Image (cartoon, rainbow, N blue to C red):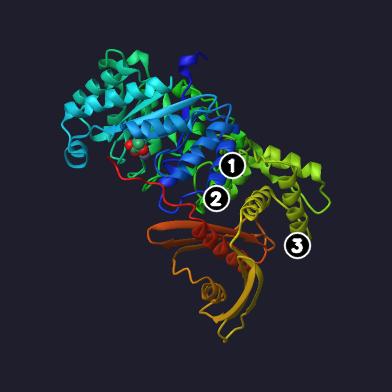
Amino acid sequence: MSNSDRVIIFDTTLRDGEQSPGASMTGEEKLRIAKALERLRVDVIEAGFAIASPGDFAAVKAIADHIKDSTVCSLSRAVDADIDRAAEALAGANSGRIHTFIATSPIHMQYKLRMQPEQVIEQAVHAVKRARNQCADVEFSCEDAGRSEIDFLCRIIEAAIDAGATTINIPDTVGYAIPHQYAATIGELLQRVPNADKAVFSVHCHNDLGLAVANSLAAVVAGARQVECTINGLGERAGNAALEEIVMAIKTREDLLGVHTNIDTPHILSTSRMVSGITGFPVQPNKAIVGANAFAHESGIHQDGVLKHRETYEIMSAQSVGWHTNKMVMGKHSGRNAFRTRLDELGIVLAGEAELNAAFARFKDLADKKHEIFDEDLQALVSETLAAEAPEHFKLVTLEVASKTGEVPDAKVVISVAGIEHSARSAGSGPVDATFKALEQIARSEATLQLYSVNAITQGTDSQGEVTVRLEKGGRIVNGNGADTDILVASAKAYIDALNLMQMGLKAHPQVADV
Ligand code: KIV
Ligand code: ZN
C-alpha cells in the first residue's frame, strides 16, 4: 500500500476530550494517557492548550519531553502569545506541532471575533508564519468550517498554505454536517485550492447529531488524510469522533475505503479503559468496539453461528481490539516479574523501582482480598498508587458504617488533615450519604457534589468497585477516583481524592475565553 493511502490519526483526548465538563485530568494522568497513546501508535497527540494555564503548559511540556514516537502538538489561538507559549512547551519534543486556529464562519466572525473576513485572513497568515518560524510542523484550523462559506474557505486555506501551514484542518465545530455534504466540501476544497497538494487535509468532527464518525469517514473517502478523534469519543458537548470506531472502520472496511492507519489495534481496549477510569466517564455497554457487550452474543442463534464459524456474526475479532488478551488472571501467587510484565503489556509505564514496589505491595494486599485479579484491577491499582504518591492533605484512616433495614445509616470516619487526625460521625439517607456528610463535617469544602458513580471493575461479587466523585466549587470541577472491594471504602477514597485535588488547585477546567 502506498504512503498516500495512510490516514494520520490525530488524537485530541487530552485537549478537546478534556474540554468535556468534568473530564479534566492532572498532569500525571495526562502523561500516563499520552504514553498509552504512543503505545497505540497514534501519529499525533494533541497534548493540550499550553497557554490555558500553568498546569496545561506543564502537561504539554512533560508530554513533549517524554514522548518519542508520536508527534506532540499544542493548540493555540491565532495570537502571538499563544503561539509562543505553545512553541516553548514543545521545545523538548522529538517531533512537535503547533496547531493554530481562527474562526471562519460568518456567525463567528461577526459575533465572536467582531472582525471583517479580510482581517481574519490577515491574522491567520500572521499566526501561521509566526508558528512556522518556531516549528516546522504547523496545523491551521478554520474553526466552524462546517458553517463557513466555501469561497472564503478556499481563500484562507490557500493563504495559510502559502504562509507555511503543513496541515489544514476543516473542523465541523458544532456537529452540523451531514456525511455526503461534508465529503463534497472536502472534495471541493481539494480541487479548488490551488496549492492543496502542499498540505495534508484533516477533519475534526463533533458528534452533536451523532454523525462525527460517519462524517469523518465520508471525508476520508473524499481525500482527507488526517482524522482528529478521541478515545471513547470524549469531547466538547456530545463529544468528538471516537478513535476506536474510526480506526476499526478503516481496518475492517479497507476493501472499500482503500486506506489504512498505523494504529496497533490490540491496545485499543486498555487505552479506552484507562481514559474511562481517569476521567470517570463510563463506557456504555453497547458502545461499539469497547463496550462490554460489543462482542457478546446473547441470542442462541447467534451463539450457535459464532461457535460454528466466528465470521457468521462477527465482522472483526475481539482479540484484534484487545478483548481476550485482557483476560489474563493474576492471583496471590503471581510474582513481581509477572506483575511487571503484565503492566508492560497493558502499556502502563511506572517511573522506577520505587513505584513498581509500591504498586506490587498494593497488588499483594488486593490479592489477599480478591481471588482473581484482572487487567482492570491492575489499572485501578496503578492509578491509586500514583495518586497516593502525590502529597495528600486529606487521608482516610478508618471508616465505620452501620446500615440495617429500617434504621437510619450512620458513618464514623477518621481522616488525617495535614498529618493531624480528626473524626466525625453523621447519619444519612444511605451509607454513602452518611459517609460523605461525615467527611464534609471535617473538610468543610463547601463543594457541590455533581456526580457519584460506581462501576464494578470486573465481573462477580468480589469485584472491586470503582467510584468517581465529581465536586464543583466556584466553577472549578474535580474528579476524584477510588477503588476497593468494599464500595463504601471506595466511595470515601474517591471523595477524599476529590478533596485533595480541590486543595491542590489541580484539575481546573482548562478552557480559556476565545479571542
Ligand atoms: O472543534 C473545533 O473547531 C476545535 C478546533 C480548535 C480545532 O476543537
Ligand atoms: Zn473540537
Amino acid type of the residue that numbered disc 1 sits on in the rendered structure: Arg
Residue 219 falls in image quadrant: top left
Type of amino acid under label 3:
Lys
Q: Give the mark toward the camera: 1 or 2.
A: 1
Quadrant housing the C terminus: top left
Q: Marks 2 and 1: in contact by CB < 8 Å?
A: yes
Q: Which mark is residue 278?
A: 2
Looking at the image, which residue is at 63% across and 44% down?
304
The residue beneath circle 3 is: 369
Q: Secondary structure at mark 3?
A: helix
Mark 3 or mark 2: whose residue is earlier in sequence: 2
Reading the image, the residue beneath label 1 is: 32
Residue drawn at x 37%, y 58% is 475
Residue 468 in view (yes/no): no
Q: Tell me where residue 208 appears, x and y as whole percent.
A: 33, 45
Q: Report whether 352 appears left or right of 67.
A: right
Which residue is at 58% across, 47% downward?
297
CA gap, disc 3 to disc 1? Answer: 27 Å
Closer to the chain start, of discs 1 and 2, is: 1
